[in-house]
Amino acid sequence: MPLSRNIASIIALLPMIIISLTVFVGCIIYSFIYSLTNSKLIPVTNFVGFDQYERLFKQRKWDVAVENIFIYGFVFTIGCLIIGFLLAVLIDQKIRGESLFRTIFLYPYAMSFVVTGLVWKWVLNPTFGLENSMHMWGFSWFELDWLVNRDLAIYAVCIAAVWQGAGFVMVLMLAGLRGIDEDIWKSLSIEGVAKWKSYLFVILPMLRPMVVTAIVLIAAGVVKVYDLILALTSGGPGYATTTPAMYVMENFFSRANLGQAFAASIIMFISVVCILAPWAFYEFYLRNKYAAN
Amino acid sequence: MGGKMKKFFSILLTLFLPLSFTNVSKAAGHMEAEVIHWWTSGGEQAAISQFAEAWQEMGNTWIDTAITGGDNARGTTVNRIIGGNPPTAAQFNISKQFVDLVEQGLLQSLEEVASAEGWRDFIYPPELIETCEFEGEFYCVPVNIHSWQWMWINNDVYKQVGLPVPQTFEEFLAGAPTIQDAGIIPLALGGQGWQESGMFDVVASSIMGFPLMQSIYRDKDVDAFRDGRFESVLNTFRELNTFTDEGSPGRLWNDTTAMVIEGKAAMQVMGDWARGEFAVAGKEAMVDYSCVIPGKEKYVALGGDVFVFPKNDDPKVKDVQLAMASMMVNPTVQAKFNNAKGSLPMRLDVDTSAADACMQMGLDLIQNPDAIMRESDDWNTPAFTSAWDDIISEFRNDPNYTVAQVMDDLEGVLTSGL
């Protein structure tokens, strides 16, 4: 009788379940219904079928936004994982002043994305940032125009994001590394395995739960990225660094184009589900099943 | 009384004090109004406080809800109206921004006070009445006129290179290489969407004239759009953009104006609110800097601000709203407000003796009905203008985006029925 056994926990979870259903599911249904209307400034029930979606897919800006989110998602996730893991490994070498370095590397994570965005905006600005300083020091060949170059601006956003996120991954990984049994290290050194090899092929697979946690947290940040880009580039130059979330917000507020915003957010929702569902199914269901067997 | 007890009472007091005040104030017949606006910069604050002071002198209370950025302020207004907690008054632009609110019956009609005071007789230019009138009733109060049609030019730069101050974009382009050779940025432009599209419309109107703009933006006439003149506007705009600096993307308009003030750049295209920056820097119109309305045909663009008054469940609020609407069009208040704001008043019988040379130029020009120019957002929804502006912004920023492609994409917007 699993139901009666879990009755207490179900009761405890009930408020959360109700909130989830009404707020999340309810809002998704609401968004979908109004995405089929031509609502402008305020929601109206003037249905126009899938016109909003058709218009959405014709937008050059939407294409750019989708492309950007993929570039950003890929570079940010990989960048954070690699740099975070490297930092964790380096700190794990029983160095002096460990807590100092840990604080330094984690510090950017304590900042809001808006602050990160503004700091990097000044650093990368060609007329008064790093480039200008280098020129004044006599390195006239130095060029750093990523932020104003429409092909590279999205990578400038990635740099700022990795700078902020890597420290967080480092802490997660470090916690994992500290949990590795001393005996494993002893046996690895008895076998004479090179240190980098032990990290890469033995320790990293053991850190799998940490990596999964890190990826889930980072991925959630990727989809909703908004404030960082707003502070750093405001989506520019032109709309070269715009993202789907920005597209939605823009249509909601400044453009008074609710129908279009709802359509875009529904597409965002569907793509997230499409990407995450198979993976989540595997990670949280199939694996447990196999493990149980 | 123990410490705990004291604390309890102080909390109780803070909770109920505001409540009791509002009750008293309503009983005493004095009026309380909350106004949402986005006038947060120094000059703008000075202007809105003219309204606030006039309102307070009438013995009323002014609750100021200033929200940075027009988009945010308008978003807040709409959310609060839908959420059932509307402000007494809210700022919008002279445009179609609030048309949905009128159509859904969410705004208070001001017809009572408008016909009693004869607004239709003194509001000038009459185009402003069109903006506010829906089915014969007034729904908004125009408070000022701001025109985009200006080039702001540093006179010293032109003296230095030995060129006369340009009067058209063609003259500017002819002199731009000389200025560039002197190590000065010819065109100061902040690379934000609204600045780019604002400048584009100035270039467009000065080259192709208002009648053609009207057939394109208002009548959506594809033949007029395709008759070759719009292409030449695009070409000129692209050429102008080769004379900007690489720090342009994302730069704020006032930082950009500062470049002209300091002589780092020669010229900026910006609305008449830029004059305030020159004034604050202690520069004198026509001496240190020139304000030029570019083109052979000179226009005053009819931009600016209005206030709307959302309907309220409380019937008393209507009286407050009508009283405030009446105050905003009062000639004395108009004079004070517009002198502080640097904008043109919405009626001609206003004392403008404090106007400087540039403002006087605008005041003279607006008396001529043929010089009054409407903007795209007078006829089109924000959805249309923003789709249009996106293409213009992309055209400026992507050198591979050809004029032919832009023409096709713009035609797509023109015929989209947005």
Image (tube, rainbow, N blue to C red):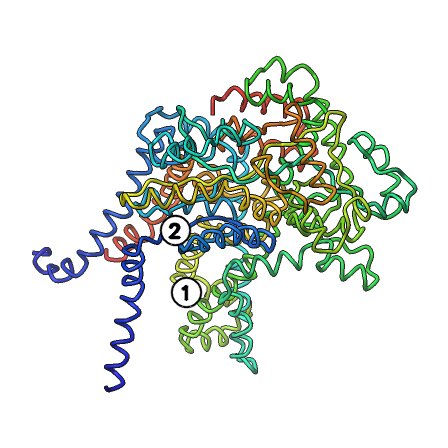
Residue B340 percent coordinates (x, y): 61, 50
Q: Is residue B215 left or right of residue A221?
A: right
The answer to whether one can see residue B398 in this image is no
Quadrant of the image occupied by residue B239? top right
- Residue reaching furthest to the bottom: B2
Label 1 crowd bin: few (<14), some (14–19), many (20+), radius 10 Å: some
Name the subunit of mark 2: B
Label 2 crowd bin: few (<14), some (14–19), many (20+), radius 10 Å: some
Residue B186 percent coordinates (x, y): 80, 42
The answer to whether one can see residue B255 in this image is yes
Name the subunit of mark 1: A
Residue B257 percent coordinates (x, y): 71, 48
**Which of these two is toward me, B96 or A103?**
B96
Residue A189's place in the image compared with A211, above or below, is: below
Q: Which mark is residue B146?
A: none
Residue at (42%, 78%) from the top-left corner? A182
Disc 1 secondary structure class: helix
Spatial distance from mark 2 to mark 1, Cα to Cα? Answer: 64 Å
> Which three-letter amino acid code belongs to the residue tagged 1?
Met
Q: Is residue B158 left or right of residue B375?
A: right
Q: Is residue B231 left or right of residue A100?
A: right
Q: Which mark is residue B33?
A: 2
Quadrant of the image occupied by residue B19? bottom left
Disc 2 secondary structure class: strand
**Labels in figure, total:** 2
Report which residue position mark 1 lands on: A206
Residue B370's place in the image compared with A177, above or below, is: above
**Which of these two is toward me, A182 or A59?**
A59
